[in-house]
Image (cartoon, rainbow, N blue to C red):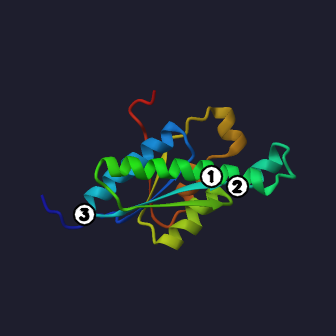
Amino acid sequence: MSNEGQMEQEYKKILVGIDGSPQADYAFDSAVEVARRNDGQVIVVAIIQNQMYDVIGYSNVNDSVLEDEAQEYKNLLDKCAERAKKVHFENVRTEVVFGSPKELLARALPKKYDIDLIMVGQSGLNAVERFMVGSVSRFVIAHAPCDVLIVHPKKID
């Protein structure tokens, strides 16, 4: 059997968005393993969606609330970097960003970092929640300039 026509894909720059969910954590851990096999880098981001505050009634959010949330996400990112170090992988870049998760994950961040692969965790939302907030994963799949991998955890406790 010939290998002609088969593509050997190496993923050197892998983007993962985290939100503190077990699904996102599993996607990050999976991204570390893919990056390790490809001698690549994981760019892990936490996205603070400003519009969320308007929707839930906090339209006059002051800067200290956003700063507190940014610090909380920074702590999550630091924990990701520490988990990677425990498995002897240190090529992790972390960033807290503000804006639309759909636009940032599908368009802006892949362009900024020249991303080869976006890895996202399978949503833990039920059907009604998915309808209300929309599916970030579905948007990313449709609009990303690179491959997208949905990570389905075998079991999340």
| SS assignment at label 1 | helix
Q: Which amino acid does the dot numbered 3 rest on? A: Gln
| SS assignment at label 3 | loop
Gap between marks 1 and 2, in whole Å? Answer: 6 Å
Q: Which amino acid does the dot numbered 2 rest on? A: Glu
Gap between marks 2 and 3, in whole Å? Answer: 48 Å
Disc nearest the viewer among 2 and 3: 2
Callout 2: few (<14), some (14-19), or many (20+) C-alpha neighbours within 10 Å? few
What percent of the width, then of the height, locates residue 40? 33, 64
Q: Earlier in the sequence, mark 3 or mark 1?
A: 3
| SS assignment at label 2 | helix
Q: Pointers 2 and 3 in contact (CB under 8 A)?
A: no
Q: In which quarter of the image is residue 106?
A: bottom right
Q: Pick the residue in front: 35 or 64.
A: 64
Callout 3: few (<14), some (14-19), or many (20+) C-alpha neighbours within 10 Å? few
Asked whether, in this view, residue 113 is left or right of residue 129, the answer is left
Q: Which residue is depicted at the point 68% across and 36% down?
A: 129
What percent of the width, then of the height, locates residue 157? 46, 27
Q: Pointers 1 and 2 in contact (CB under 8 A)?
A: yes
Report which residue position mark 3 lands on: 6
* Image quadrant occupied by the N terminus: bottom left
Report which residue position mark 1 lands on: 71
Q: Which residue is depicted at the point 73% across and 54% down?
A: 66
Question: Can you see residue 157?
Answer: yes
Report which residue position mark 2 lands on: 67
Q: Pointers 3 and 1 in contact (CB under 8 A)?
A: no
